[in-house]
Amino acid sequence: MKNLEVHRAIISVSNKENLVPFARFLSSRGIEILSTGGTAKTLKIEEIPVKEVSDFTGMKEVMSGRLKTLHPKVFGGILARRTHEDLQSLDELGGAPIDLIVVNFYPFEETAKIKTATFEELIEKIDIGGPSMVRAAAKNFESVCVVVDPKDYLVLMDQIKKNGGIDYKTRLKLASKAFEVTARYDAAIALKLSHIVSEDKSDFPPFMPLFFKKVEDLRYGENPHQKAAFYKDEERYLGNLIKHQGKELSYNNIIDIDAAYGLVLDLPKPASAVIKHTNPCGVGLGETPLSAFLRAKETDPLSSFGGIVAFNVPVDKETASALTEMFLEVIVAPRFDDEALEILSKKKNLRVISITEQKFFAGLNYKRVAGGLLVQESDTFLDDRERKVVTKREPTKEEMEALELAYAVCKHVKSNAIVLCDRNGTVGVGAGQMSRVDSVKISKMKAFKETKGCVAASDAFFPFPDGIEELGNGGITAVIQPGGSIKDKEVIEAADRYNMAMVFTGRRHFRHG
């Protein structure tokens, strides 16, 4: 396929980023520019030769500009293949070939995010001519080039300079991107309107279009026989992570990074967490990132081997030196000092990741099941401030600080979850058991020190007093849990027998998967 020479272009854009230099370049190459409305006005102000589409078609814009590009001369010029038959038909229309379409749409998605936008304003932001021209040009990519993203202007300029035209591969790639953009645009409109007209007034729309862009193929999935890839959306912080060094990220690495960073963002600063298979081996607070990390590692140094370490503060050289003393898969933090990066670079395979996002992701979460999709809000601590003391004894100030830490960590442990803590970090973690009392036993078994004087958190209510009795026998002095069991009275009585303080939160934090 030979390169496409450009003689005539339509430019009609809402996003005018880099418009002027691009249009000036096209004009300097003798390319005729057709345009409409605000785009034409901008080009005229910049003294770039431009012809109104209405002059090209011989039809004035009507219906307040709603009808301007929807004309046989425009669409004939776009859809005509460069064959004798098509060009003859186009000539009979009085039209001429259009080789380049540069279009982006009215900002419907941006308007839809404005809470005060009226229904009429939304409707007016539904673009008709723009998507129609883009689809026509993308279909006829063998004869026409379509550009929907200002970032691609440089590609076209470079090709026209070097090759005198645009090659087939580029035209096909841009056509594919154009259909991706129109699909997303139409889906955004359908999503918003279906939500508006929905009779059930649910927080969730009647249908759920999902668009994710591939970041990379991964070596494999959870297991070597499973293929995998990583896709990102426009919001979530993992889609914008920066990898400074180390081996390529694996499927399991990314899951663990998500778990680790989500955990430390729920904690006071400075905090560190060591994660293994999405569960925290240990969590620590400190005056510095180093002291926080050392406290986190202390909880379970054996399981920390080969783990993922996260921080909610920048990593300095002292912390980096300590991190290099053990085998780790990934270190993730908001930022790394230059000296820290230099020290960590000695561990060639160690993946070092920075994520500048400092707010826990609160969007929707999706889970694929056979034949369907489960959608839910993220589990956040927003408005999670109910704290009701239900025992005879109130927790001390020190106990309450430890309880809050334990409860924050517990939210990130697979259910059934029990977390033992002191004021500085985790002491023992019991995760993912079928019986809550077994999670209690495991948390005690995993404790790195005497549990007497520690506190405990549970992600859900205690169904029987046995879990409290097990904690009481281990010297636990205070417990935080949601409450809500039909056995709450017996559970509270068990806590009182051990002179244990118990706080109900009224909110469960199950984490099944």
Image (cartoon, grey):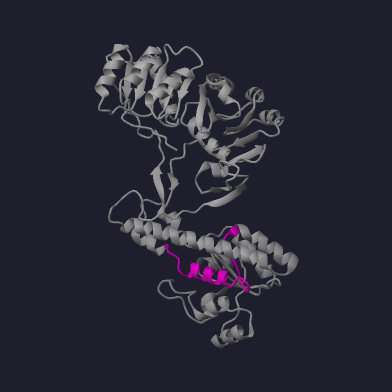
383 w.r.t. 270: above or below: below
Could you say which is closer to the camera, residue 472 or residue 109?
Answer: 472
Q: Which residues are magenta?
A: 125-150
- Left or right: residue 253 versus residue 477 is right
Magenta segment: does it hold 138?
A: yes
Q: Residue at x 63, y 72 (%)?
A: 142
Residue 332 found in image quarter: top right
Q: Position of residue 108 (x, y in %)?
A: 44, 59
- Assign the C terminus to one quadrant of the image: top left
Q: Position of residue 416 (x, y in %)?
A: 40, 29
- Assign the N terminus to one quadrant of the image: bottom right
136 w.r.t. 247: above or below: below
Residue 486 found in image quarter: top left
Q: Position of residue 80 (x, y in %)?
A: 58, 79
Q: Position of residue 455 (x, y in %)?
A: 40, 17
Residue 23 visible, this angle: no
Residue 42 visible, this angle: yes
Magenta segment: does it hold 236?
A: no
Q: Residue furthest right?
A: 162
Could you say which is closer to the camera, residue 141 or residue 12?
Answer: 141
Q: Number of numbered discs present?
A: 0
Q: Residue at x 58, y 22 (%)?
A: 302
- Left or right: residue 311 versus residue 486 is right
Q: Residue furthest bottom?
A: 92
